[in-house]
Amino acid sequence: MRWELTEEQGEIRDEFVGWLRHVAGAEDIRRWDDEGPAEFAAAFVEAGWSALGVPEGEGGAGGGLLELALLSEAMGAFGVPSSTWLAGAVAQPAIAGRGALLAGMAEGAQVAVAVPAGSAPDQVLRGRERLPSMEGGVLDGGVSLVLGVTHESRLVVPAVQGDAVLLALVEPGASGLELRDRALLDRTRRAADVSFGSTPAEALDVDAPAVLQQCALRAGVLVAADALGVSQRMLDLAVEYSGQREQFGQPIGAFQAMKHAAATILVGVEAARSVVFPAAAAVDQGNDMALAWASAAKAQIGASGIAAADSALTMHGAIGYTWEHDLHRHYKRAKLDATLFGTVEEWNERIAEMLDLVPST
């Protein structure tokens, strides 16, 4: 099956890709790896892209998860910083009824769900003993490796209160709130450890488990879209290089092994494209199969992204390992995508649980 975008969605994709070509040159992207994402984030907001996905009635540009997936795919392909944007897109279900916060997001305000970057947001419900505690309107505890959180972020914190799990909102700069930056192998993304010490927080009037599941579905789809973009970029680089490098008097792309390797990556890319956008639409529509679609997208594309990274590196040979070549950046991003917000195995397990192939926990 090949997913067909609407004319408007195609225009959004083309306009965003054109904008990235203008603002995200190779030297700019490498500089952001060293200096941080602030320059790109400011340009992103100034161009109005932060308003996409926020309802028009809340000051946004409208659009849903599918439109955000188009942005995620392009950001993966270009290798631009995306942590704070992704964190906000994942957190949106938690603040769906809070117009001022949504309007702020459209203008670039940062929001993040305080969950470990290696777990899907709803997985924290299976380890309540590790969650921060909330009593008397204050939070105590900590969360390790939260993606995209900065000192300007509002935090949506899953916390234990008595026998229940709730979501609490923490404002930037709240007393007792501390962040410790963590370095990732993929330098295009950022994370930090978060700790709370009698930190004031507001309990959100939401169904925490239901909201966290919606956050998880969005995370699965958007990371899968990023991995799709990364895979396409690695394929393009490998094909381009195989037409330039010569061995035995002819381009290495003429050899059957190289053709097979490129064809295998291409099959993975096209298969990924056929699942990620229907998955986004299913989640947006509240389809009964949304969990299955999102799980399949995250598991399938995470796995094919790893395979594409390994094949592209082999096709490049020694130059692919060098710091000067861009392949290593995409390789590392693909590897992180495979584990970001849950591993391939964990998302496959969700499908197995739906099919009653393994007991749920």
Image (spheres, grey):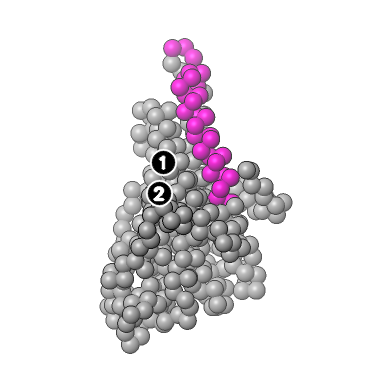
Please tell me which residue is depicted at 59% across the width and 67% down the height of the picture.
Answer: 54
For marks 1 and 2, the one nearer the N-term is 1
**Which amino acid, by three-letter code, is at mark 1?**
Ile
Q: Quadrant of residue 212?
A: bottom left
- Residue at the far right: name it: 7
Position of residue 35 measured from the top left corner of the image (x, y, whole percent): 39, 54
Which residue does the numbered mark 2 point to in the structure image?
344
Dot 1 crowding, Cα within 10 Å, few <14, some 14–19, many 20+: many
Which residue does the numbered mark 1 point to in the structure image?
306
Q: In the picture, which quadrant includes the N terminus?
A: top right
Magenta-drawn segment: 248-277
Magenta stretch containing residue 218, yes or no? no
Q: Quadrant of residue 84?
A: bottom left
Q: Is residue 345 left or right of residue 270?
A: left
Position of residue 316 measured from the top left corner of the image (x, y, whole percent): 42, 29
Question: Are the residues tagged 1 and 2 within 8 Å (C-beta)?
Answer: yes
Residue 85 visible in rendering: no
- Up/down of 295 relative to 1, above or below: below
- Up/down of 329 relative to 142, above or below: above
Dot 2 crowding, Cα within 10 Å, few <14, some 14–19, many 20+: many
User: Mark 1 against mark 2, which lies toward the viewer?
Assistant: 2
